[in-house]
Amino acid sequence: MTENMSVLQDAFKDDDQVLLLSHSVTPVKDSVSILKHYAEGKGVITNKWHLVTGDRKQIYDLGRQAYFVEEDLGNEKTDDDFLHTENFVLIDKNKHIRGIYNGLNKTAVQQLIADIKTLEIEDK
């Protein structure tokens, strides 16, 4: 996923309209300093791609209720159930989900790049 997110970063590194955001799903282990070290090792451009952490419940609620990234939607989850997904979610300026893409699939990532470019044309 990191490799494919790097492809997105490279495609839009000079485009101020596109920001990348990665949420930690293991915030107990992923402190700000750990994420910073990881970002430095992966060539993350800090004003383009943001790696964030925070309260586990808030991150999981966001993933399940705002991004809808859970693979088995409709199945009741508890706070103890682990959340991890390979999905990349395209969100527009109005905070609407415009697409969900398999972040492990290079073809899906290329489609995401094309969809971002189309969305930018629509916004003009």
Image (cartoon, rainbow, N blue to C red):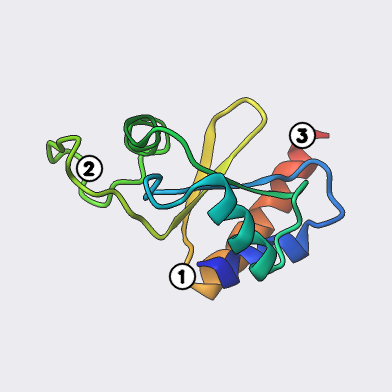
Q: CA distance from mark 2 to mark 1?
A: 20 Å
* Element assignment for label 3: helix
Q: Position of residue 13 (x, y in %)?
A: 81, 57
**Which residue is most to the front?**
33
Residue at the image point whose x is 54% and y is 55% from the top: 34
Q: Which residue is mark 3?
A: 123
In the rendered image, which residue does mark 2 sit on? 73
Using residue 76 as the reference point, say whether residue 37 is left or right of it.
right
Q: Amino acid at mark 2?
A: Leu
User: In the rendering, which numbered label is found on residue 18?
Assistant: none
Task: Assign a secondary structure to mark 1.
Answer: loop
Q: Nearer the viewer, mark 1 or mark 3?
A: 1
- On the rendered image, what quadrant is the C terminus found in? top right
Helix, strand or loop status at disc 2: loop
Provide the residue designation for mark 1.
Answer: 104
Task: Name above or below for residue 64 compared with residue 8.
Answer: above
Residue 44 is left or right of residue 95, and the answer is right
Identified at 62% across, 60% down, the residue is: 37
At a point 40% along the width and 45% down the height, the residue shown is: 27
Choose the circle earlier in sequence order: 2 or 1.
Answer: 2
59 or 29: which is nearer to us?
29
- Label 3: how many Cα within 10 Å (few below 14, some 14–19, many 20+): few
Callout 3 amino acid: Asp
